[in-house]
Image: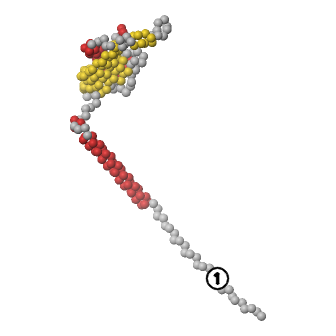
Amino acid sequence: MPIFSTNDVKKLGKDNFKLWNDALATKDPKKVAAMYSDKEGELSFLPTVSPEHIKKIPGAEDYFKDFVQRNPAGTITDEVFQMFDSGGTTLTALGGAGQPGAVPTRVQAYLHTGLYTFMLDGPGGRAPVSARFSYMWKKYGKDGWKITHHHSSVTPSSTPAAATSTSIGPTYEMQKYTSDLAIAAVAMAALAAVAALAAAAKAFSSKAPSITTAPAPAPAPPPLTAPVPVCSKLN
């Protein structure tokens, strides 16, 4: 059962985002990283310009060392809040007198999602970068609210209006165009292969040594048989 009204959650979310944004302005990566949860196994940070899945505070600090040097300043352009409250029914494995046991604790968290735009320094000067974001903030007693999840990714480019004017036409035309290109490419490759084979055959025939075939020997004449003399019988 939520303990905050919708307006309370919105105010809390805006205040916490401002604290995070102000921490960036200090250009101190330790202060920014301190906004994230240091509880084992609870941090999931997927930054905008890093391929890493950061799960520990030192990783977050390393990321912000470079990021804060670009003088980032974020402005939220669209947002949604969702509040979560266990109402004291969540059990944690905490026992008394050294004995394991389940103790009910209250878990409060909220999800903040939407779009923001950052102004960043770059080689060409200061420029805006639009991105999507999601934060999960969780309350840790006296430590207050910490970020347990943060995902940020650059907003994809919008699809040109011409490509979405109809649901079938442009898609079919693009598929046909791609198919025609593929067929033409295969045909050109086949022609090139035939031309290469013809050139190779011509080059081989011009450089190969001539081979003279000896004529077959004439057949031998039949052997001559001497006539056998006929002897008359002597009386």
Instruction: Give the x, y percent position of residue 33.
Output: 35, 17
Instruction: Give the x, y percent position of residue 37.
Output: 37, 15
For mark 1, does the 10 Å Cα neighbourhood hold few (<14), some (14 to 19), or many (20 or more) residues?
A: few
Left or right for 128, reference 226: left
Q: Read off the residue under disc 1.
A: 225
Vertically, is 40 above or below 200? Answer: above
Q: Residue at x 36, y 26 (%)?
A: 50
Left or right for 82, reference 228: left
Q: Residue at x 28, y 45 (%)?
A: 177
Give the residue type at disc 1.
Thr
Q: Residue at x 29, y 12 (%)?
A: 4
Q: Of helix, strand and loop, which one carries label 1?
A: loop
Q: Is residue 49 something that shows in the picture? A: yes
Instruction: Give the x, y percent position of residue 8.
Output: 26, 12
Name the residue nearer the viewer: 195 or 2: 2
Q: Where's the C terminus, which quadrant?
A: bottom right
Taking the view exactly as shown, the residue that stands out farthest to the right is 235
Instruction: Give the x, y percent position of residue 204.
Output: 43, 58
Name the residue nearer the viewer: 9 or 233: 9
